[in-house]
Amino acid sequence: MTKLLLAITLSLLAACASSVNVDYKQNISFTQFKTFLVQSKPVNVTKDTRIDNPFVQERVIKAIGDNLVAKGFTVNKSAPDIVVKYHLVIKQEIESDDSGITLGYGTVSRHSFLGMSYNFPERDISSIDNLVVTIDIFDNNNLLWRGSLGSRLYDGSTPESNTRLISGLVKDILEQFPPK
């Protein structure tokens, strides 16, 4: 029974995970590209001090470089095959938590129970900030590939939590590159 509950919980968590948005030129063979350069400044960044700072930009550049090197690419600052550019944006979303009727049924030994509750309609509305990272890959100023993913920003971030967040987003995005 606990294995079934664990499987259901993991399935629900996987369903809640964000998926990477990817688009690319389909008539290009990405196997021809071996070297890269990451642009030092973002193309676009929200004027929010949580992400508009050199520490975040360094983390993004390092995460992109580490992931591409792990895929077999090498850095070439003079004549790279591809140039990697990135965007950092904070998007606000509104979240609403509605109340309603709950119905439950359970058994213990030989006894069965049926229960019902009603929650008074209270709407808890809150604003959520999501960091969206977009990575663009160019060849001679032609966009070849784009990947994008967002994740919720939480209050009280630390350098370690920021590094984990950015590294995770970049890793998930670049798992889709090069396209197969």
Image (spheres, helix red, strand yellow):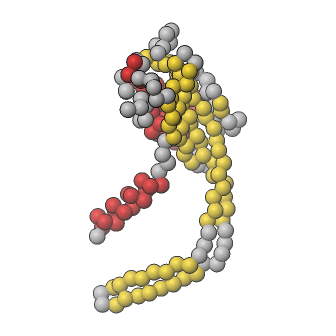
Please report the residue visible at 33 percent of the width from the left and 85 percent of the height from the top: 108
Residue that lies at the very extreme toward the bottom in this rendered image: 111
Q: Is residue 111 above or below residue 127?
A: below
Q: Quadrant of residue 179?
A: top left
Up-down: is 132 above or below 155?
A: above
* Relative to 98, 147 lies left or right: left
Res 61 seen here: no
Say which of 35 and 51 sits in front. Answer: 35
- The residue at the point 66 percent across, 58 percent down is 126
Picture coordinates of residue 138, whole percent (x, y): 53, 22
Residues 28 and 35: in front is 28
Quadrant in the picture for the C terminus:
top left
Please state the horizontal and vertical placement of residue 51, each as a whole percent of the image: 63, 36
Left or right: 29 in relation to 39: left
Q: Please, which residue is most extreme toward the top here?
A: 78
**Does 57 appear above or below 8?**
above
All told, the count of numbered labels is 0
**Residue 129 visible within the image:** yes
Name above or below for residue 22 compared with residue 116: above
Quadrant containing the N terminus in the rendered view? bottom left
Where residue 170 appears, x then y in whole percent? Answer: 48, 35
Q: Please provide percent x and percent y for residue 171.
A: 44, 36
Name the residue furthest right: 47
Residue drawn 49% across and 81% down?
A: 103
Residue occupying the point 60% across, 78% down:
119
